[in-house]
Image (tube, coloured by chain):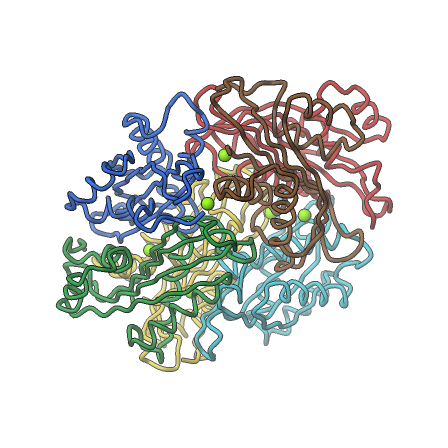
Chain colours: A red, B brown, C yellow, D cyan, E green, F blue
Amino acid sequence: MALNQNFRIGRKALLLLLNEEDKKQHERLADAGWCYCTGKVGSMEAHKVVAAVETAAKNNQIINKELYREGHALYHAIIEALQGVTRGQVQIGSVLRTVGLSFSVVRGSPYENSAEGEWIAVSLYGTIGAPVKGAEHETIGLGINHI
Amino acid sequence: MALNQNFRIGRKALLLLLNEEDKKQHERLADAGWCYCTGKVGSMEAHKVVAAVETAAKNNQIINKELYREGHALYHAIIEALQGVTRGQVQIGSVLRTVGLSFSVVRGSPYENSAEGEWIAVSLYGTIGAPVKGAEHETIGLGINHI
Amino acid sequence: MALNQNFRIGRKALLLLLNEEDKKQHERLADAGWCYCTGKVGSMEAHKVVAAVETAAKNNQIINKELYREGHALYHAIIEALQGVTRGQVQIGSVLRTVGLSFSVVRGSPYENSAEGEWIAVSLYGTIGAPVKGAEHETIGLGINHI
Amino acid sequence: MALNQNFRIGRKALLLLLNEEDKKQHERLADAGWCYCTGKVGSMEAHKVVAAVETAAKNNQIINKELYREGHALYHAIIEALQGVTRGQVQIGSVLRTVGLSFSVVRGSPYENSAEGEWIAVSLYGTIGAPVKGAEHETIGLGINHI
Amino acid sequence: MALNQNFRIGRKALLLLLNEEDKKQHERLADAGWCYCTGKVGSMEAHKVVAAVETAAKNNQIINKELYREGHALYHAIIEALQGVTRGQVQIGSVLRTVGLSFSVVRGSPYENSAEGEWIAVSLYGTIGAPVKGAEHETIGLGINHI
Amino acid sequence: MALNQNFRIGRKALLLLLNEEDKKQHERLADAGWCYCTGKVGSMEAHKVVAAVETAAKNNQIINKELYREGHALYHAIIEALQGVTRGQVQIGSVLRTVGLSFSVVRGSPYENSAEGEWIAVSLYGTIGAPVKGAEHETIGLGINHI
Ligand SMILES: [Mg+2]
Ligand SMILES: [Mg+2]
Ligand SMILES: [Mg+2]
Ligand SMILES: [Mg+2]
Ligand SMILES: [Mg+2]
Ligand SMILES: [Mg+2]
């Protein structure tokens, strides 16, 4: 069941956000036959963050939009990532804060045993804070699910 | 109030964990006069994760162990980071899972305006899963607080 | 203090939803002198689920709408049932999901000792998922309170 | 993506617990080629409830214990079911209460489109209350996941 | 349904803790025929706080220990009060902190309409912090329930 | 690190709300050179409660509105206080309830060791309940942070 240390899906999703200048990171993912996408979303509404990630994942064929099981896997990964971002209640504007986030979604096979199949990682990184320019600090979240 | 884009404390804390091979990252932090430490902890008990990070931060003089205000700042940053790791309830063994985490603690001045003073970032990265070798996936958390 | 095994209020509330074809279930409740009502609600807003259950319970005289203590008992039972439905945060549309629920409210005396008095059970059963036809799975919740 | 109204996996998991006398329910599941198991667990420790359900599911070949992806699917379904049981924090003895639960685990294909594949439902039903005989009320939980 | 402004049960429970020198407060409660008790508990385990309050309430005849409905009302009031004390997860030592609390339990009829009957208020006030002398700040909680 | 028993910041914030008639309380705070403000807010939206407290604290110079670190300290204190008020999810109208609150914000140095510096306490006290006149009970919350 062991994770392949060269193909850690969460780490790859995170580095897509943190090392935006790193071309090699993109090549390595492509070489492995993994698919991924990145995007940005700023909002005071959690459902808009969910929608932005879902839409990007569908439009980039990371998940098959005809299959609920893939949407379900993605949805729970997004919510888990949002829990890291919001740390306590999955609420943004309703508790008077706003987020500016980059996100990545990576789909691949991170386990050495190929029977473990595909998994999906959603990573969010950016800022959270008051709806006042600059009154914010960084935040991150990662959600991982089997797909 | 703006964050200095070259000194994002959370990103630095995260890269300390994700780019462990990167010497330059350590140099840049030292050049900026920031202090930081890293460590590892594996446990089924959340309080042992808290204790491992607190002890490392105190032993490496990241915080002054004589001052409760510094311990208070660190504590809340650790708990926020743990919320990203645990995604829902800050519980590990009590819901039959275990974590193997690397952690970093970074203290520095990430805002352009020096009056914003020092902040502390706690980052956790590793795996979470069943208490069975390999039955685990990655997880991350980041907590940031003024100090 | 023991629960009367023939008059388990939660089980009865659940079977009202799950065995909708079962006439005997309704007769047994009526024979025991218990009162109950059922209804349906679909919404992306948790407060509309709360309101639908409260309104049905008041309109069917399950609770006395002039007494706050009865409304208070019912309210907490509804919120507890919603926690089973939402599993983590009592949010629906704000995290981009929707529910289609049947509900039942049962009021009766489920304990062998009559001094234990009346209790109220709220049961919710239906689907939760994306706001896309069919992209949903089942969900249930049960809240029980003394009244 | 629609749920097949004759094969609602959550409803079946719930009826396995609530209609324990109902032979037909077992036949219908067997006829559909679904697999399932039931069991009981009483504890003041949440991790023992998780372990009891996991062990039963593995011993009855509901999931393949060699594959983490199946264990992962089951684990999250159990935790979701426990959220319905505990309604707020997934804690039992640590907040001075105890549970006596029956559980069922059902694995099958509840969607009309066979490409939706297999799903797993975990249902918990029983009592929760003070560690005093009879000082308890009923509780239920349902968790559903793709597998 | 209005609260009687001279008999606000939560305020009285709080003042019992905060104005410990105030004799008149005790007289006013006695004059109204309300019953109450106070006590202290220090612990790293939430269940010991629950037990301390429950035991005091039973030993002082604030609730009838033979009736589960009274124990149920008290239990939920205690847990609600603990949520104010713990602010996020009802955990103490499991996240490496400790509490030193005074508590009060008040039972009375706070509404102008006597049909609203009796209610119970649990108030907790004290300190929470690291298990290090002085590394702590104040905390409060209030839970109110119909009984 | 010990708290000065004569200058407990949380107790003072609470008494500002509970003993509104007490002139001496105000004098004692002024004599100590502490600053504070009080106000009222009624709303079904949590973000309006946050905004009301933030605005009062800024307009009364309790915090420096040019510094994010002070706003950050205040924000987390408000959210912690709201957790006592809402007991479980920091939601008001979205779960069909409303609050009518008085609040106080106190800034001062509550520790005997002056190196512990300034802290901020936010206290909320009032009623929570259905959006129906009188269908409500009392509620309280206290959040404390270093500043
Ligand atoms: Mg997982
Ligand atoms: Mg913050
Ligand atoms: Mg209960
Ligand atoms: Mg789901
Ligand atoms: Mg209430
Ligand atoms: Mg604190």
Which residue occupies the foreground of this view, F98 or F34? F34
Residue B92 occupies quadrant: bottom right
In the image, B72 versus B65, the foreground residue is: B65
Which quadrant holds residue F72? top left
Question: Which of the two residues, E139 or D26, is positioned nearer the viewer here?
Answer: E139
Q: Nearer the viewer, residue A137 or E108?
A: A137
Q: Point out residue E136 in the picture as x, y percentages from the top left corner.
A: 45, 50
Question: Taking E84 as reference, is C1 above or below it?
Answer: below
Q: Is residue D34 left or right of residue E97?
A: right
Q: How many marks?
A: 0
Residue depicted at 73% across the width and 42% down the height: A147
Q: Residue at x 31, y 37 (%)?
A: F105
Q: Is residue F74 visible in the rendered structure shown here?
A: yes
Whole-percent x, y for residue F119 in the image? 39, 38
Whole-percent x and y of residue F2? Answer: 42, 49
Position above or below: C112 against F120: below
Q: Is residue C24 visible?
A: no
Indicate the position of residue E99 as horizontal and vertical percent values: 45, 57
E82 versus D100 height, above or below: above
Residue B107 vs E66, above or below: the answer is: above
Q: Quadrant of residue E13?
A: bottom left
Q: Quadrant of the N terminus of chain D?
A: top right
